[in-house]
Structures are given as C-alpha cells and as structure tokens.
Amino acid sequence: MHSTAIPVGNFENKYESANPLARYLVDRFLNAFDDLVVRAQPESVLEAGCGEGALMRRLENTGAQKIKGVDIAADVFAKAQRELDPSRYSFEEKSIYDLTTAEDGADTVICCEVLEHVDDPESALAALHALKARRYILSVPREPLWRVLNMARLKYLGDFGNTPGHLNHWSQQGFQKFISAKFEILELRAPLPWTMVLCAPR
C-alpha cells in the first residue's frame, strides 16, 4: 500500500515566485521544458502529478489535442480545470501508482517534480513505463545542489536544506542511472538546480 501523505502542489509555488533569482531559475527550467516538448512533438499528453497545471498550460500551442493531468488531490488542479478548454484538457484525481494504459495512455508522458516525493520510486517509474508512451519528459531536483541552495537562502536549515516532502534524492548521474534500466535517454538538460530528460521506453 503506497502512502499519499505527502505535500501536494508546490510547497512554495515556484512558478509564481516574485523573487528575481527564483524567477530566473524557474525561467531556465521552463525554457528547458519547452525545448524538450518541441523535440517530443506530442500528439497527446498525460502529465502525472500535474499540480496546479502550470506545465499543462505551456502545451496550448503544441499539436497535442488531448492533454490530461492527474494528481492525488483534486483541489490542487481545480483552478486549471475551470480555466482550460474542456474539449482539449481533462483532469483526474489519481495516484501515479494507479495509472493504466486504458485510461491514461498518451503519446507523451510528463512527470516533472514528482518522483522525489513518492514513497516507492521504483514502482512509480514502473507505472510510468507500463504506459508505453512514445516519449517521456522527466525531471527531479539535482542533489546535493538543491539542498545547498536552500541552505544558502536560509531555508529548511533544520533538515539540512531538504524541502518538505522530498523523500528521494538524486544527483544528475544518479537519476540517469535510475531511469536507464527502463528508458533510453534521448536528451539531457540541466537547468540549475534540476535534472531533466527526454526519454523513450526500452
């Protein structure tokens, strides 16, 4: 039985931060994401762990006609669900462990800033892989740099810079090794302080 007792959405909503440095770093993250989306050329999309829908909104000008977001708490994506075109966008309250090809299959799967939160990353990765999408875009915080930067801004000092809810920690090399058992990495991006990959199932 997998626990869902973890923070949902962004503990600090990085996509709407007014801090100039945070805004700069997030813009680099989003630019890397946009670049990998262009390279993926999605026809349909599933975002596992869609949060507030910030990344789903960036898919409006792509060729993807069906874009689905799932998250473990419906209140997190409620605003996006109200605002986005229901003929193109759909949302469902669901755990990453419960994804099925019949209900959630898509040409491209996005799972960004999620795997660091799950209690069983191997099973979560297997659930993503079982969807057999053509392309995947995955990202996680890059450790130990993530915690070092948190401590530099005097955040979470009692936990040595670990953001609440981060259960798993990967270096860039460690994350590549983790996913390489099931995925072939096609493109790697390293917007500070994240690791982001475009990959295909083996």
Image: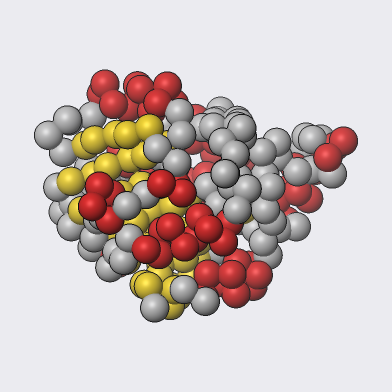
**Percent position of residue 98, x then y:** 41, 46
Against 70, residue 197 (above or below) is below
Identify the image quadrant of residue 75.
top left
Say if residue 27 shows up in the picture: yes
Looking at the image, which residue sits at the far front?
A: 1
Residue 59 located left or right of residue 18? left
Identify the image quadrant of residue 78.
top left
Residue at 59% in and 39% down: 3
Residue 182 located left or right of residue 155? left
Residue at 36% in and 72% down: 200
**Percent position of residue 169, x then y:** 69, 56
Near-viewer residue (102 or 92): 102
Residue at 56% in and 36% down: 4
Quadrant location of the C terminus in the rendered image: bottom left
**Percent position of residue 181, x then y:** 52, 76
Looking at the image, which residue sits at the far right?
A: 158
Say if residue 54 shows up in the picture: no
